[in-house]
Amino acid sequence: MRANTKIMALAASAALLAGAARAEAPAPARADVLQKLSACRGLAEDAARLACFDAATAAMDAAEKKGDLVVMDRGQIREAKRQAFGLELGGAFRIFDRASADGGKSEEIDEVTLTVARASRDREGHWVLTATDGQVWRQIDGERVNEAPKQGSKMEIRKASLGSFFLKVDGQRAIRARREQ
């Protein structure tokens, strides 16, 4: 086996092991204010249960207003993941991967479609594309783009192997890109 082949095999094995270790990470514990709210259901006496719920919801509301508790629905999580697509955030979004009540996991964003707000070239002639939502993507390969991107062009960006991304502008051949902002 050649040295390059061995290195590639080791890199692939390390990536697989890292993914497996990440998948086995325990789900984060529930927030204290949420645990207290859930505990109220166990009270048998109506008046005590109502008083418990009133106190727990007041504490939960106060924690949210202070910023100690953040409540998001699946749509908001999906939008946050879409906005962060392409950024190196480590395990920041693993908190959203707790199994749902139906046994599923939150979905992974593998591609996004954006609209070009501004297109320019850097000193090396690579395209730098700014989307209408503020995302900035830079071409990192030497592939030629047949038709220059312009304001209003559609960018389709999808995950590729080993943390890289493919970017298509208006359906043209894909170029390799990385997100800068």
Image (cartoon, rainbow, N blue to C red):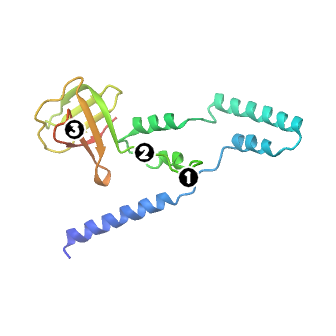
Picture coordinates of residue 54, whole percent (x, y)? 79, 31
Front-most of 31 and 172?
Answer: 172
Residue wearing tag 3: 168
| Disc number for residue 31 | none
Answer few, some or many: residues within 10 Å of disc 3's Cα (few below 14, many 20 plus, some between 14 and 19).
some
Q: Is mark 2 on a helix, strand or loop?
A: loop
Q: Which of marks 1 and 2 is nearer the N terminus?
A: 2
Residue wearing tag 2: 89
The type of residue carrying mark 3 is: Lys
| Disc number for residue 103 | 1
Q: What element carries label 1?
A: loop
Residue 60 is left or right of residue 4, and the answer is right
Front-most of 137 and 175?
Answer: 175
Identify the residue at horizontal 19%, vertical 36% (top origin): 171
**Disc 3 to disc 1, how far (Cα)?**
35 Å
Is the residue 57 above or below the residue 16 in the image? above
**Disc 1 to disc 2, how far (Cα)?**
26 Å
Q: Is mark 3 on a helix, strand or loop?
A: strand
Is the residue 32 above or below the residue 24 in the image? above
Answer few, some or many: residues within 10 Å of disc 1's Cα (few below 14, many 20 plus, some between 14 and 19).
few
Identify the residue at horizontal 19%, vertical 25% (top origin): 150
The type of residue carrying mark 1 is: Gly
Picture coordinates of residue 42, whole percent (x, y)? 81, 46
Q: Which of marks 3 and 2 is nearer the N terminus?
A: 2
